[in-house]
Image (cartoon, rainbow, N blue to C red):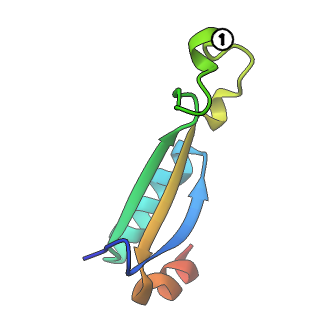
């Protein structure tokens, strides 16, 4: 079981295709992982500019950030596979 205390950040990508490939590699090798997805265009308490401008002028290829975490004991194997 992966928790906040025993996980390690494996990789960050903005590509939906790449995150799909990474998930497949980890699944094929029975490596448990957690995936955090961040919508870079969603408003936040600190920066609420999207409400005024929408996505005008923003690169939609980097709209989502995907952060992979694995258990610390699986990190070296997972890094090698990627």
Q: Position of residue 61 (x, y in %)?
A: 65, 33
Left or right of 2 in this view: 26: right
Q: What is the number of callouts on the image?
A: 1
Q: Which image quarter is the C terminus in? A: bottom right
What residue sits right under mark 1 in the picture?
Answer: 53
Looking at this view, is 49 or 27 the one in front? 49
Q: On the rendered structure, is 28 left or right of 50?
A: left
State the residue in front, 32 or 57.
57
Task: Out of 4 and 19, give the one closest to the viewer.
Answer: 4
Q: How crowded is mark 1: few (under 14 residues within 10 Å), some or many (20 or more)?
A: few
Q: Residue at x 48, y 83 (%)?
A: 75
Coordinates of residue 20 in the picture (x, y in percent): 45, 52
- Residue 51: x percent and y percent? 56, 13
Q: At x 51% / y 51%, what residue is drawn? A: 66
**Quarter of the figure with residue 2:** bottom left
The quadrant of the rendering that contains the N terminus is bottom left
Residue lying farthest to the front in this orientation: 46
Vertical comparison of 18 with 5: above or below: above
Using the image, determine if residue 40 lies above or below residue 79: above
Q: Is residue 21 left or right of residue 27?
A: right
């Amino acid at each position: 079981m992966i928790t906040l205390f025993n996980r390690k950040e494996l990789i960050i990508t903005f590509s939906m295709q790449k995150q799909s490939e990474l998930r497949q590699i980890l699944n094929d090798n029975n490596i448990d992982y957690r995936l955090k997805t961040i919508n870079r265009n969603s408003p936040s308490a600190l920066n609420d500019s999207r409400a005024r401008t929408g996505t005008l002028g923003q690169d939609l290829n980097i709209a989502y950030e995907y952060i992979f975490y694995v258990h610390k004991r699986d990190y070296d194997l997972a890094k090698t596979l990627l």
